[in-house]
Image: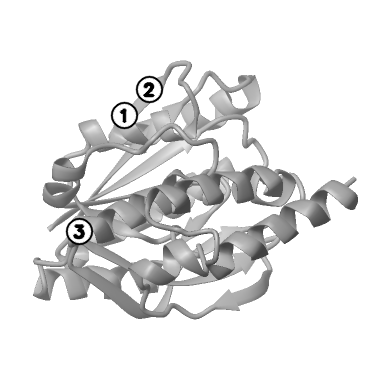
């Protein structure tokens, strides 16, 4: 069984080296465990510091493209189009895959190749890589996602290539293309599996996309959830609008 790790990159000089080392270590270990891993990196013409790091690890990567893209979703779509794994994920250049969790997940897929989408728990880490929060995974529910809680476990999510070939690419959202994609998996009757262990580490800090532009996330979540069935009377409608009001009155500095 083969796995593809797609890495969208743009000016994350503080963390990209750690992310590349993490992916390469998993690739190196995979062979002895009966799996193959390919790494595809798409960089949107980052500055010289990032380019120097990429060049340092280029030989260990299966594909490197340095070309201006339309955004993170576009870089990932390039990977979806070109990857050759049975399953693929994307790994942001400030996040990490948990090696132990990955190989447990790979073993589950080896025994259950009918799974279309699989995910697990997530550790939130800070700038220093210290765990600041832990989120146990739980079974996602389509209606709950669009009407109540739009939380998904994107880091460490793996998608079956044969299935995603039937539902298309990520849509051009700035932030919530993962939320829309997982809703689309549900709508298209994906066979979904929840792992009861940690699969990834998600880096959360003030300068990160998640930490810096929360109102954009909320607005995109409202639009996407409406497209999939959210009604004005659903909890997510009132809660999201209250969050937007809070950020308007008390913006982050």
| 210 over 103 or under it: above or below | above
Q: Nearer the viewer, residue 94 or 247?
A: 247
Q: Dividing the image into 4 quarters, which one contains the N terminus?
A: bottom left
> For the point 64% across and 42% down, which residue is it?
216
Residue 152 seen in render:
no
> What is the spatial separation of the Cα atoms under label 1 and label 2, in whole angstroms?
10 Å
Determine crowd level at label 2: few under 14, some 14-19, many 20+ residues with C-alpha closer than 10 A.
some
Q: Nearer the viewer, residue 180 or 156?
A: 180
Q: Earlier in the sequence, mark 3 or mark 1?
A: 3
> For the point 48% across and 34% down, which residue is it?
72
The residue carrying mark 1 is 78
| Camera-side mark, 3 or 2 | 2
Residue 31: image tag: 3
The residue carrying mark 2 is 65
Percent x, y of residue 45: 53, 18
Determine crowd level at label 3: few under 14, some 14-19, many 20+ residues with C-alpha closer than 10 A.
few
Q: Earlier in the sequence, mark 3 or mark 2?
A: 3
Percent x, y of residue 96: 50, 57
| 230 over 212 or under it: above or below | below
Percent x, y of residue 143: 37, 69
Q: Nearer the viewer, residue 170 or 40?
A: 170
Residue 76: name its quadrant.
top left
> For the point 35% across and 38% down, which residue is it?
170
Is 72 displayed left or right of 228 in the figure?
Answer: right
Is 76 displayed left or right of 226 in the figure?
Answer: left
């Amino acid at each position: 069984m083969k796995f593809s790790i797609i890495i969208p990159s743009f000016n994350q000089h503080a963390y990209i080296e750690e992310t590349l080392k993490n992916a390469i270590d998993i690739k190196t270990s995979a062979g002895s465990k009966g799996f193959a891993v390919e790494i595809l990196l798409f960089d949107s013409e980052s500055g010289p510091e990032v380019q120097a790091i990429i060049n340092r690890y280029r030989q260990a990567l299966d594909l490197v493209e340095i070309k201006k893209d339309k955004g993170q979703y576009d870089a990932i779509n390039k990977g979806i189009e070109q990857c050759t794994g049975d399953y693929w994920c994307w790994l942001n250049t400030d996040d990490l895959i948990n090696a132990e969790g990955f190989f447990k997940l790979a073993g589950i897929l080896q025994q259950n190749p009918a799974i279309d989408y699989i995910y697990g728990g997530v550790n939130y880490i800070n700038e220093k890589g210290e765990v600041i929060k832990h989120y146990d995974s739980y079974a996602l529910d389509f209606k709950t996602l669009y009407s109540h809680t739009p939380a998904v476990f994107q880091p460490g999510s793996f998608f079956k290539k044969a299935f995603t070939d039937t539902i298309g690419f990520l849509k051009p959202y700035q932030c919530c293309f993962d939320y829309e994609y997982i809703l689309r998996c549900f709508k298209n009757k994906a066979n979904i599996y929840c792992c009861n262990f940690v699969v990834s580490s998600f880096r959360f800090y003030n300068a990160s996309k998640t930490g810096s532009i929360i109102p954009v996330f909320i607005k995109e979540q409202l639009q996407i959830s409406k497209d999939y069935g959210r009604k004005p009377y659903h909890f997510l409608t009132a809660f999201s609008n209250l969050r937007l009001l809070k950020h308007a009155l008390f913006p982050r500095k």
